Image (tube, helix red, strand yellow):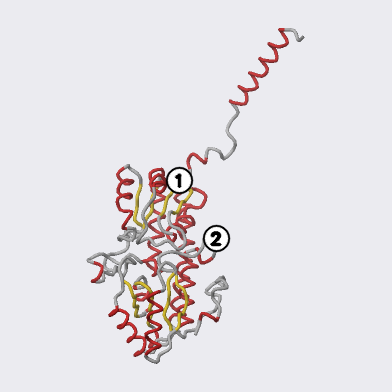
């Protein structure tokens, strides 16, 4: 049996060891986790910009992934918890996330920084179609020059919340804006290679008006700006006549909208002796799969621009601006 003094010594040694461990300084970099910004975003297009501009100084959580329609999105209880826990909430605005209005107002009322990334876009630029009851068209990301302004809003919002990181945010935003400007230059070149008479973009819903305004295309959406609206028989007949009269060769489906109405157009045109094909699947209200090139803002627009130009008779490289477009961009999608 061990002597009582030896047992006491062992106990004291163990206690000192525990206390010593408890008093060890934190590992290098561990305090950074306490100061890292928490950002929650709504759409993927905002998430992509926020991640690139924030860099390592923030964690960015996007609520809406690939294939999610923001017009119809209703926040879950988990979403509300994420919004309330965030330091900064970034959303599109212009009533895009209409079903999230109450949640966003609740978060703003709690003292959090809640910012619409479109708020610095001049109102004179915004489109207000009659069928949208006085509201502005929210799809401004379809014009890269407008979306670059949103990048600046994100930069300034992060800098205001974290002044120590302002220079890093500014440098990251400069890279992002330069990439967007290069994208715009590519889009202008290949889209203008389409013959003037064929510059008509027919899509499932009217998400491309800013695109048309920027690049000189007539845009026809079967549904209205919001996917909550429905197309009628007269809408289909009117667009079929447009396809036949102007000999438009392709129409386009969207990743977040049903193909039903597009197929009705094709059938109607064929019945009148004019062949129309599906020119490709465009990204409108959501980007491509996470981790893919099309799952970035630049990749999303590059995909759309390249598909549209090739399908309507223009000159665009099959692999897009940066040679990164995937296997979906085969000649099978071009008439």
Picture quadrant where residue 22 is located = top right
Figure quadrant of residue 49:
bottom left
Whether tag 2 and tag 1 are in contact, CB under 8 A, the answer is: no
In the structure shown, which secondary structural element does the residue marked by tag 1 occupy?
A: strand
Viewport quadrant of the N terminus: top right
| Residue 309 shown left or right of residue 124 in the figure | right
Q: How far from the left and from the top, in percent, is residue 119? A: 32, 58
Where is mark 2, residue-wise? Answer: 291
- Count every numbered label the image shows and give the total: 2
The Cα atoms of the two marked residues, 2 and 1, are separated by 22 Å
Mark 2 secondary-structure assignment: loop
Residue 185: x and y, percent? Answer: 45, 74
x and y percentages locating residue 271 in the rendered image: 38, 89
Of marks 2 and 1, the one in the foreground = 2
Residue at the location (40% across, 64% down)?
148
Instruction: Say if 111 sits above or below 46 in the image.
Output: above
Residue ID for mark 1: 37
In the depicted view, which residue is nearer to us: 198 or 239?
239
Residue at point 36%, 59% (across, down): 92
Residue at figure coordinates x 34%, y 67% from the top left:
227
Q: Earlier in the sequence, mark 2 or mark 1?
A: 1
- Count neighbours of disc 2 (C-alpha within 10 A) and say few if under 14, some if 14 to 19, many if 20 or more: few
Could you say which is closer to the camera, residue 234 or residue 110? Answer: 234
């Amino acid at each position: 049996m061990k002597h009582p003094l030896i047992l006491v010594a062992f106990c004291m040694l163990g206690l000192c060891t525990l206390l010593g461990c408890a008093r060890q300084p934190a590992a290098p970099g561990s305090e950074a986790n306490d100061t890292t910004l928490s950002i929650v975003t709504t759409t993927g297009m905002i998430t992509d910009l926020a991640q690139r501009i924030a860099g390592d100084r923030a964690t960015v959580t996007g609520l809406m992934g690939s294939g999610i329609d923001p017009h119809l999105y209703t926040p879950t209880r988990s979403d509300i918890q994420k919004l309330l826990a965030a330091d900064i909430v970034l959303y599109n605005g212009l009533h895009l996330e209409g079903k999230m209005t109450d949640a966003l107002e609740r978060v703003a009322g709690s003292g959090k920084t809640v910012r619409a990334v479109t708020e610095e876009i001049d109102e004179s630029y915004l489109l207000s179609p009659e069928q949208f009851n006085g509201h502005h068209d929210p799809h401004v990301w379809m014009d890269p020059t407008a979306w670059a302004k949103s990048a600046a809003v994100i930069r300034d919002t992060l800098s205001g919340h974290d002044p120590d990181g302002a220079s890093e945010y500014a440098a990251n935003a400069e890279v992002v804006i330069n990439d967007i400007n290069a994208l715009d230059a590519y889009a202008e070149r290949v889209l203008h290679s389409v013959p003037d008479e064929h510059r008509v973009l027919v899509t499932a819903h009217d998400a491309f008006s800013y695109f048309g305004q920027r690049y000189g295309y007539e845009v026809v959406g079967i549904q209205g700006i919001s996917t909550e609206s429905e197309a009628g028989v007269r809408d289909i007949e009117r667009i079929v006549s447009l396809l036949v009269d102007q000999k438009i060769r392709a129409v386009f489906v969207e990743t977040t909208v049903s193909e039903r109405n597009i197929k009705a157009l094709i059938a109607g045109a064929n019945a009148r002796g004019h062949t129309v094909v599906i020119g490709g699947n465009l990204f409108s209200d959501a980007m491509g799969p996470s981790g893919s090139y099309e799952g970035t803002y630049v990749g999303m627009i590059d995909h759309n621009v390249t598909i549209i130009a090739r399908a309507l008779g223009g000159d665009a490289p099959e692999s897009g601006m940066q040679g990164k477009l995937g296997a979906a961009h085969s000649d099978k999608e071009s008439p």
